[in-house]
Image: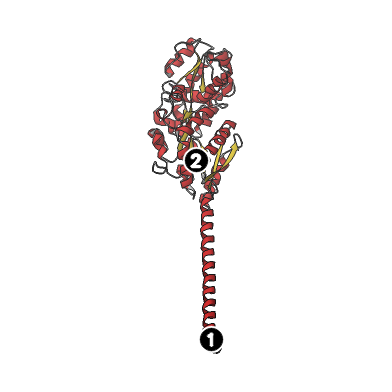
Amino acid sequence: MRKNKPLLSLLTVVGLSMSLLAGCGSTSDAKSTASESGTAAASSTPVSFNFYFTGSQNVKDLWDSLEPMFEKEHPDIDVKMVYIPSGTGAEPTYDRIVAAKKAGKGSGDIDLYEDGIVAVSQGIKDGVWAQLDNKHIPNLDKVNASTMKDVNNYAVPYRSSAVVLAYNSGKVSSPPKTLDELLTWIKANPGQFAYNDPSTGGSGSSFVQTIVYKDLPEEDIHNADPSVMDKWSTGFNTLKELGPYVYGKGIYPKKNQGTLDLLMNGEVSIIPAWSDMVLQQLNEGLLPDTIKMQQITPGFNGGPTYLMVNQASDKKEAVDTFLNFVLSPEAQEVVVNKMNGFPGIELSNMPKDVQSKFDGVAEGFRTFNIGDLGKEMNKRWQSDVAAQ
């Protein structure tokens, strides 16, 4: 028995050692498996970014349609949309972006922002927008190069609209094609032209600005320096002279819809109007099918609505993927159908029916960027024109 005891002890030790080693191996394997499982779980968690936008209900409807389309294609990205209803003020959102930058607090939880050319220009000056390129957003190649040059690639123009001449083709067979022809037509057809109070809607504001800047250098429509106001007298004299020839010998309806109502009811034959409003009301049967649209030369105001990426965002890769989707022909067709706006990409990339829909109105407009001078112009219009 004594001779067998060392052997038994040895076997016991070996067995215990193997058991311990097996236990260690099991623990290691379990940790490894748990680690791999955790990594897989982490990688399957969508990357989230915050997208702030404002506008009327149709803008919200648009993004409510596009977001699920995008996330179906890209389940690894979650777009958290923050809608600010029109009239509640988008300015605080921009202020938050600037404040976060100054305080060194990153993006302020705002990764993507939608606004117009004024916010684009201000953001470039403040250094808050990221410059974009087609390496990360290939569909930027589908956007008009001059449009991207206007913003130095700091913003994505995803939709556009413009003020055009809307006219009753049953009464006007050959509408004016130039601003000079329009002025001649207004005087030759008293009471048949109307534009709204410029402080109440963009179509009336566009008409006033186009007249005031008619004979000024082209660069002045991109100049917010108050010194430009010294050149306005000729344009305002023209507006005063038109007073007796416009609707009601000087009646200026309120809001963009005010002049559209006059056109709808046959009280006038030509008005300046937003292209998207005309298209929407034609689609809904509110305007008769005799209403047509045409841009003039030089063009009325128009331009894109832009998407800007916060320079401080740490979600740029996910945001770029989203922007590339927004500029795809499929997403742009939703923009056209929901907003009745011009696509952000060139029409040649769109289906033929979309191209024909915007024939003659999706080009030729000009983007005015005069900052606070627009408010000064409205004040002067009230005193020099409306008060006459």
| Point 42% across, 18% down: residue | 178
| Point 50% across, 25% down: residue | 206
Q: Please, what secondary structure does the residue beneath circle 2 have?
A: helix
On screen, 261 above or below 76? above
Q: Which mark is residue 69?
A: none
**Residue 330 in view, yes or no:** yes
Residues at marks 2 and 1 touching, judged by CB atoms closer than 8 Å: no
Quarter that holds the N terminus: bottom right
**Residue 104 in view, yes or no:** no
Q: Amino acid at mark 1?
A: Asn
Query: On the image, numbered disc 1 is attached to which residue?
Result: 4
Measured as percent of width and height from the top left, residue 88 is found at: 61, 37
Count neighbours of disc 1 (C-alpha within 10 A) and say few if under 14, some if 14 to 19, many if 20 or more: few
Measured as percent of width and height from the top left, residue 29 is found at: 51, 64
Colour basis: secondary structure
On screen, 96 above or below 85? below
In this view, the residue in front, 126 or 287, is 287
Residue 363: which quarter of the image? top left
Q: How far separated are the C-alphas under marks 2 and 1?
A: 72 Å
Quarter that holds the C terminus: top right
On screen, 231 above or below 173? below
Measured as percent of width and height from the top left, residue 224 is found at: 46, 35
Q: Which mark is residue 73?
A: 2
Count neighbours of disc 2 (C-alpha within 10 A) and say few if under 14, some if 14 to 19, many if 20 or more: few
Q: Amino acid at mark 2?
A: Glu
**Mark closest to the chain's N terminus, 2 or 1:** 1
Measured as percent of width and height from the top left, residue 128 is found at: 48, 46
Q: Please, what secondary structure does the residue beneath circle 1 have?
A: helix
In this view, the residue in front, 349 or 269, is 349
In this view, the residue in front, 237 or 55, is 55
| Point 55% across, 34% down: residue | 65
Count how many numbered circles sit on residues in the image: 2
